[in-house]
Image (tube, helix red, strand yellow):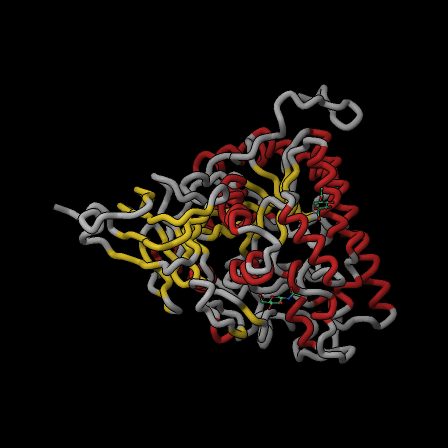
Amino acid sequence: MSPKFDLVVVNGIVVTAADAVPCCIGIKGGKIHTLSPSFSSDEIEGAQIIDAEGAYVMPGGVDAHVHLCQDLKTGAHGLGGECADDFETGSRSAAAGGTTTIITFATQTRDETDRSLIKVVEAYNARAEATGSFIDYGFHIIIVRNDPEILENELPILVRDWGVTSCKLFMTYKSQRLTDTQLLDVMLASQKNEITTMIHAENGDMIQWLAEKLENKGMVAPYYHALSRPPVVEMEATNRAIALAGLIENPILFVHIGSPLAAANVRNAQTQGMPIYAETCPQYLNLTYDDLQKFHSPTCFENSKHICSPPPPPGTSDHDELYLGLHNGTFTIFSSDHCPFRYDHPHGKPSGDLVSRKPGSFRFIPNGIPGVETRMSLLYTGGLATGRITPRKFVELTSTNPSKLYGLYPKKGAIMPGSDADLVIWHPQKTFEPFALSNDMLHHNVDYTPYEGKEFVNWPRYTILRGRVIWAEGELKGKPYDGEYLKRGPSYFGTGPAGRRRDARKTATWLR
Ligand SMILES: *[C@@H]1O[C@H](CO)[C@@H](O)[C@H](O)[C@H]1NC(C)=O
Ligand SMILES: *[C@@H]1O[C@H](CO)[C@@H](O)[C@H](O)[C@H]1NC(C)=O
């Protein structure tokens, strides 16, 4: 007789977005099969057994914001960096950090050859298939133009054939930003196709104006990147995007919100019943302006290791506000925005004019930092272990809500019979010795981590993908082609409460 289960996890505290209970999990055929207070020895005969020793057992991490195989052209002169991670190295790093699903970005550009979104996705898919992935993956599509025939003809095909049910739009970066009219065009098309609209909300004009003023004053060191994008830049753009979305009643998700000012706009819209969602990332809860001037030299290039957009907030009181937003539901999801550039590499942080890493302008430094592997442990250390968020909230933010938002639930993000057996099992807290992180412990293809030397109080002990252990006790057990492409469905989150009164002062009620 074949064993009842392939794998059982015993002695864990099983945490979901709803509950935390001591129980055992029986896994069969890659799926969660049984949850039970205990198993008899007959029942677990022949199964592989993992003893969680009292530690938290959670749904595997779902990181909905990961840049892989994507060279970015975000610099002032269209210059940008070379993405350090491909699907193999990026997904390997994710697995070692407790993540079992990533959603990455296929990117349209302004090149004529990139008009067709379907071709963009096909080409990007080829990059994924070239190396394979350690974990499951799906794609978002970045749209940088509003060609009516493409939106009309191709979006339905992306949804139907590829399960690409989310797009990302930019309000900044010369080579990507859309005007308000263009934003409305794409949002309306997304809405018709039940595609979730993700928005990078920063006011591009304010940034460009400030950056020029800074440069004219010779204020060009990496630190001044932050001063070219003060929080008001994000506040203005979120406010505007909320108004635009409200006009046509389109749900939106703000990616990487980095300031309490923007979070307050989101909160206000939510209070009015609008379907406005927000994401924040580890860097906004851990780094500050200080990290951009750590080395105290006005030109110190090493500070470029912390350059991302929006920048980390000015001070730690901002962290407290953002943690409050995680706790009180303003933030729907917590993602890494892993955007990897090497430091010691001509196509990495020193791109553009900074070939010799000599003092140059912050404007040429590619924006983005690595973090797919540290996402879960940073939130564990800074949020869960400190009691700022509950274990249930941790699961909601890192796994369940991203699965719901992006049409993967309850295959992903849940521990219930029939769900994929994707799990992260932590170390028992009582016996775990805190340790200081160094980059050589990580599995990405980047030569630094912004969290070098920081102390972590826990780390994933096991990562399990569809019933197979892919990371155990500090060692990778999986392989690059273990991961499967995920065709996603529509968002599980609605378009706001039914019967919500449409306010003709804010909505073009006659439009639909
Ligand atoms: C940043 O994260 C590290 C590691 O989790 C932690 O030790 C440190 O206290 C955090 N710092 C802040 C300012 O949150
Ligand atoms: C919830 O958090 C947000 C974001 O930090 C904040 O703006 C808002 O005031 C908080 N609301 C309540 C009711 O605590």
Whether residue 424 appears in this view of the structure is: yes
Q: At x 64% / y 59%, what residue is drawn?
A: 73
Res 66 → quadrant? bottom right
Q: Point out residue 211 in the picture as x, y percentages from the top left corner.
A: 80, 62
**Left or right of residue 77, residue 494 in this image:** left
Res 314 → quadrant? bottom right
Split into 4 quadrants, where in the image is the C terminus?
top right
**Left or right of residue 121, residue 45 in this image:** left
Q: Is residue 438 above or below residue 83?
A: below
Q: Is residue 358 above or below residue 372?
A: below
Q: Point out residue 40 in the picture as x, y percentages from the top left corner.
A: 22, 48
Q: Point out residue 238 in the picture as x, y percentages from the top left corner.
A: 73, 44
- Figure quarter occupied by ligand 1: bottom right
Q: At x 33% / y 45%, what residue is drawn?
A: 37
The one of 371 and 164 positioned closer to us in this rendering: 371
**Left or right of residue 336, residue 501 in this image:** right
The one of 176 and 441 positioned closer to us in this rendering: 441
Whether residue 143 appears in this view of the structure is: no
Total marks drawn? Answer: 0
Q: At x 66% / y 38%, what residue is drawn?
A: 276
Q: At x 63% / y 52%, what residue is drawn?
A: 280
Res 357 → quadrant? bottom right
Q: Point out residue 115 in the picture as x, y percentages from the top left corner.
A: 58, 44
Q: Is residue 288 above or below residue 2?
A: below
